Image (spheres, rainbow, N blue to C red):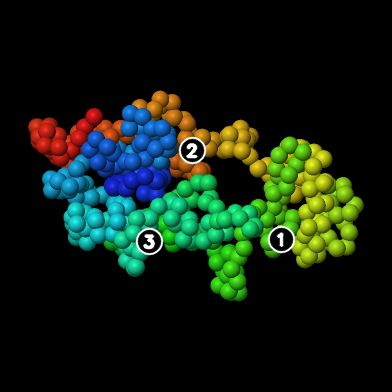
Amino acid sequence: MMLEGIRVLDLSRVIAGPYCAMLLGDLGADVIKVERPGRGDDLRYLRGGTNAMSAPFAGCNRNKRGIAVDLQKPEGATLVFELARGADVVLENFLPGVAAKLGLGYRDVSAANPRVVYASVTGFGQDGPYAKRPGYNTIAQGMSGIMGLTGMPGQPPTRVGASVSDLAGSWVAFGMINAALVHRERTGRGQHLDVNLLASSMALLPDPAAIYLATGERPKREGNRNPALTPAEAYPTKDGWLNLVLLNEDQYARLCDVLGDPELTAERFATNEGRLAHYADFRARMEAALSRATTAEWVERMERGNIAAGPIYEFDEVFEDPQVKHLGLVAEFAQPGLGHARVLGFPARASATPASIRRPAPRIGEHTDEILQELGLAREEIDRLVAAGVVWRP
């Protein structure tokens, strides 16, 4: 596997950090997740979680071993420092300065382990006027411009219905960690990676940012429409909705053939500029044409015409799609505390070293004894630490 032999110490919680660590685990890394004794990660209890295990937690924490340590106790922080000393990657999402107060900041860890790749994922970065603010997905969506761009014309800003800012931070951290590991192989030195949700969310907007910075004009909320291109939006059909995107006039000519409406070939609609200039009339003609058949029928016809189109699914329909099934995007495994888990798998394929699921998400402290024994602690010492509340086992 790609990352076999790489050890990751996951000190993070909720989504942005844990999802990144899980991706590393999917590619073969040995990921050790550190949690609070008894309570664990807050994601364990969201959306109806019971027995300290929820479906979202299972979906973000597979391929990890779990240890429960009280970092507020000096002995606990020392144990985790020893884990960091032997790690290739340390991933944390404390507020800036908290890890350092625990003796687990980059300066201390890298002094003992110069090869460590140390990734900090926060809301706003390690310094600056907002560094000490807690930051979550919706906060970053709002401040990055994502919500300002999302919504129907004349309506309030709208949150994207997924944790896109958390996941943007996850993917940026995932890429940076892997690049830093390559750099370490060349130089022998690790480094500190400062990843934040605000910057990662803004990185999802390169085209609207470039347009605004070039023109100084604030973009409007356009709903499902591309304001610079048409047809490039969502249209109602006989039984649902269809996304349709065209980029040139050759494609438009093929669309007119598929739709069979002579009026769409009129001179005023012949170019993208003309269609934009007569947008209301053009939209009405498109709606009238597309209302004559179902979404599935139009998708089939568009495919035959080599036109980019796709259905707009309700969420339960996504997983019935033949291509989704073919790609194997749903992973299934037995999850202690939850039963049979069905979650999203790794989203890409590799011909030689594919991702795999080797273990379910851990119970709180499930591997405490195993991990401490790997550190060289005797059974009697582990029992003493459990009795003292420094570590916890189920």
Q: Nearer the viewer, residue 174 or 96?
A: 96
Task: Tell which tag, 3 or 1, sits nearer the viewer.
Answer: 3
Give the CA separation, mark 3 to mark 1.
34 Å
Q: Where does label 1 land, which residue?
A: 229
**Does 345 sit left or right of 321 as displayed?**
left
Q: In terms of sequence position, does the residue under pointer 3 or pointer 1 come before the other?
A: 3
Task: Tell which tag, 2 or 3, sits nearer the viewer.
Answer: 3
The residue under the point 78% across, 65% down is 277
Q: In terms of sequence position, does the residue under pointer 2 or pointer 3 come before the other?
A: 3
Q: Alpha-carbon neighbours of circle 1 within 10 Å: few (<14), some, or many (≥20)?
A: some
Q: Where does label 2 land, which residue?
A: 344
The residue under the point 71% across, 60% down is 229
The residue under the point 35% across, 37% down is 44
| Element at label 3 | loop
Place residue 358 in its image quadrant.
top left
Location of residue 63 in the rendering, given as x and y in whole percent from the top left corner: 36, 38
Q: Nearer the viewer, residue 32 or 221?
A: 221
Give the CA separation, mark 1 to mark 2.
33 Å
State which quarter of the image contains the N terminus: top left
Looking at the image, can residue 305 be seen?
no
Give the CA separation, mark 2 to mark 3.
28 Å
Q: Alpha-carbon neighbours of circle 3 within 10 Å: few (<14), some, or many (≥20)?
A: many
Give above or below for 81 relative to 52. below
Q: Are marks 2 and 3 in contact (CB under 8 Å)?
A: no
Q: Amino acid at mark 3?
A: Phe
Location of residue 130 in the rendering, given as x and y in whole percent from the top left corner: 35, 64
Location of residue 218 in the rendering, given as x and y in whole percent from the top left corner: 59, 68
**Does 334 sit left or right of 289 as displayed?**
left
Q: Where does label 3 land, which residue?
A: 124
Looking at the image, can residue 111 be seen?
yes
Q: In terms of sequence position, does the residue under pointer 1 or pointer 2 come before the other?
A: 1
Q: Amino acid at mark 2?
A: Leu
